[in-house]
Image (cartoon, rainbow, N blue to C red):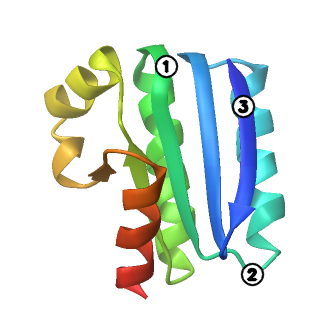
Amino acid sequence: MKTDSTIQDGILFVRLSGDLIGSPDTQQLLQSVDQHLGEEVRNCAVDLSGIRYINSTGIGVLVSLLTKFRSRGGELLLINPADHPRKMLALTKLNAIFSIADDEQSAAQQLKAVN
């Protein structure tokens, strides 16, 4: 899995590609997000459009990230999940928990409206 992250207007944008499964990359992702939380980032948008496959560990990572941001008074939303992640979110009924945006611009608008 490849990870790229940027901060724009106090929002952490995380772009993922490949497979979101239990791997060393997953730990690096969580550590990277933890570092950004110290930079007064309260909201996060995770782009899942490049994720081909996600398993239960990957779902757990997303739930963990959501919990990190919500426990600090922030929010996390998902951007344009690819077909398999979208099916997994529906299967686990987590599509009712996560907010989903079509692109980064609408994600930024939704997150700004929350605060």
Identify the residue under disc 3.
3
Point out residue 76 in the picture as x, y percentages from the top left corner.
46, 61
At x 74% / y 37%, what residue is drawn?
4
- Measured as percent of width and height from the top left, residue 55 is found at 42, 17
Q: Residues within 10 Å of mark 2 (few under 14, many from 20)?
A: few
Residue 23 x %, y %: 70, 18
The residue beneath circle 1 is 51
Quadrant in the rendering for residue 56: top left
Residue in the image at 84% along x and 61% along y? 35
**Location of the N terminus (image quadrant):** top right
**In the rendered structure, which amino acid carries the disc numbered 2?**
Glu
Q: Which residue is mark 2?
A: 40
Give the left or right position of residue 98, taking residue 28 as reference.
left
Relative height, residue 25 to residue 5 (above, below): above
Report the Cα–Cα distance between label 2 and label 3: 21 Å
Horizontal relation, residue 77 to residue 34: left or right: left
Placement of the C terminus among the 4 image quadrants:
bottom left
Disc 3 crowd, CA 10 A, few/some/many (<14, 14-19, 20+): some
**Label 1: which secondary element:** strand
- Mark 1, residues whose alpha carbon is within 10 Å: few (<14), some, or many (≥20)? many
Measured from the top left, where is residue 91 in percent x and y?
15, 26
Tell me the residue at 73%/62% (across/down).
Answer: 7
